[in-house]
Amino acid sequence: MSCRPLAFAMRELTVGQLIMSLFSNMVFTLEMHRAVWAGDHERLLYDRLQHGYNVLARPVKNESEAVVVHLGMDLQQILDVDEKAQTITTNVWLNIKWHDVYLTWDPSEYGNIKEVRLPINNIWKPDVLLYNSVDQRFDAMWPVNAIVTYTGNVTWIPPAIVKSTCRIDVTSFPFDDQTCSMKFGSWTYSGFFTDLYNSTVSLDPYTPNGEWHLLSATSHRNRIFYECCPEPYNDVTFKISVRRRTLYYGINLVIPSILISSLALLGFALPPDSGEKLNLCVTIFMSLCVFMLMVAETMPQTSDTLPLIEVYFTCVMFEVGASVICTVIVLNFHHRNAEAYFPMPRLLRIVLLDWFAWILRMSRPSRVRVGDNNEEDQPKKTFLTYLQGTESGLNNSHVIVPTVEVDSKLLVHPQVYSSIQNGYGHGEYKVSSNGTDYHIGKCHKKKSADKQLARHKRLAESIEGRFMQFRAPDEARTKLLSTPIGVDHTSNHVQHKPEPIHSCLSNTQFEALMMHLKVISGKVQKEEYLNEIHEDWMFAAMVVDRICFITFSGFLFLCTALIVYRAPHLFA
C-alpha cells in the first residue's frame, strides 16, 4: 500500500515538469521568432514587394488610366559637336518619375522603412528612348536601381552619354550659334497609356566646354499624331543652345587670312623691275588655297549653305586672282618694246595718261609726248635749224629736227667748221670751238667793210634774240646745251668769249657736215621716238598699278566690313 502513493507522486512530478518544459520551450520559441523579424524587415519587404509582381503590367488599377511619367534632365557636359557628321555628344542624367500602385506598404509594419532600392529590371518602367539617337546601342541609359517610396512613387535617375543628331547651320561659321535637340518619348505606349510630361533642366553640375559656350537648356512637351496610329504620342524635347568660342578660329584662321589678303596689296607697290611681282601674287594665291582646304575639312559636306569664312576666302581669292591678271597686264605694259608694238592708242592715252593720272594726282617729269603739237611743249630751235630756215637755199628735204645731238667726233677741238658763204647767203658766220662749247664766229673775207656790215645787219635783224642749242662734248652721249646768242649791231662779230677766229668751211665741207648731221639727227629722232613710246607704256603701267591698289584696297575693306557686319557676334 505504501508504494502506490510514492509512484503516484512521482508521476505527478513528471507531468508537471513536462508541462513546465513545454511552456518554457514555447516562450523561448516565441521570443526567438520575434527577434528574427526585428532585424529582417527590409528583406521581408523586398520579398513582399516582389511576390506576385509582373514587370510587364502597367502599374494602374484601371486599365483605362494612363501612367503619368515626368521626365527631367541634369546636363553634365557637352562632349563634342561634330559639324561634319552633324551630331552632338552629351553627358546627361535623366530624371524619370512615375507612380506604381503595386509598390506601396505601411512603414510601421516593416520597421518604419519608407523607401527601398529596387533593380530597374525587376519593376515596370516606361520604355522612354531617345528618338534621334545615333548611338550604336541606341539606348545608352545605364540600368541603375530605382528609388521606391512607401507611397508608390518611383524615381529613376540613369546616367547616359547620348549621341544625337543635330542640324548644324554653318552660315555664320566661325561666329555661329547652334541649337541641338534631344527628343525623348515612349516607343510603344501612346498617350492613352503613358502620359509624358516635362520637368526642369538642371545646370548645376554642368562642366564648361572649351570650344562651345552654353547659352541655355530648355525642355518642352509635344503631343504628336502620326500617320500610322490614331492615338496621340507624347514626347519631351530638350533644346541646348550653344555658341562657338571664336578665339581659336580668330587666331588660326581669320587673322592670318586678313594678313595674307593685305599682303596681296603689296604686289601693286612692288616695282616691276624687281622681278618678284608676279611670284608674290601667286604665292599669296596658293596660301589662300591652303586655308580654304583647312576650313573645308571642318565643314559639313553640304551644299545648303556656305560658311561666312568661306565666302570671305572666296572673295579674297577672287581679289588675289584678279591681282595676278592685273599684274600680268602691268608687266606687259612696263616691258613693252616700242619697236615691236604700235604707239599707245589715243583713247587709251587720254583715259590712262590724262584722266586717271589727273584723278590719282600722278605726274612724270617729262611733259614732252610723241604727237603733241603744243608750242609750249616744243623745245627751242637749234642753230642748225635756223640755218635751214634762213636764206640758205637748202631745199625742204634738208630740214633737221629740233634738238640735234652732235657727235663729238665731228666737232673735235680745235677743228673748225665755218664758211657757208657760197650758195647759202650768209657766209660771214662760222662754227668755232674753244674746247668746251661751240660759238658763232665771223669769217674774215677780203671784202669791203660796207658789204660785210650790210650783210651782218640783215642777219642780225633776223637772228637777234634767238637761242642756239649745242651740247658740250665732255657730256656723256654729247647732249645739247641751250646757249643764248646776242648780236652786237655796232660790231662786225657776234658776241662770245674772245677766241681766235679760224678759217671758214667750204661749200662741199658744209654739205658733208649737213649730211652727217641729218643721219645722226634721224637716228636720234628714232631713238627719242621709241624712248617716248616706251616711257608712255611705263607710265601707263604705273597708273594701272595705282588704280588696282586703290580698287583692291577698297574691295578688301568692303568685304571685311560686310563679314563683320553679318557676323552675329565677334567674341564669345
Image (tube, rainbow, N blue to C red):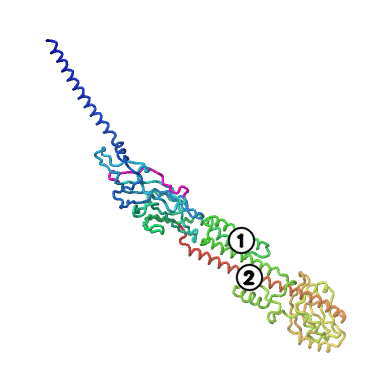
Q: Magenta stretch?
A: 135-152
> From this viewpoint, which residue is outermost toward the left?
1
Give coordinates of residue 446: x percent, y percent.
88, 85
Can you identify the residue that label 2 sits on? 544
**Total labels drawn:** 2
1 sits left or right of 392 in the view: left
Residue nearest the observer in this picture, 478 or 569: 569
Give coordinates of residue 330: x percent, y percent.
66, 68
Residue 42 falls within the magenta-colored stretch: no
Can you identify the residue that label 1 sits on? 285
Could you classify mark 2 by the number of other residues whose Cα lies within 10 Å: few (under 14), some (14-19), or many (20 or more)?
Answer: many
In the rendered image, which quarter is residue 555 located in? bottom right
245 sits left or right of 470 in the view: left
Residue nearest the observer in this picture, 252 or 549: 252
Residue 139 falls within the magenta-colored stretch: yes
Query: Which comes sooner in the sequence, label 2 or label 1?
Result: 1
Foreground tag (2 vs 1): 1
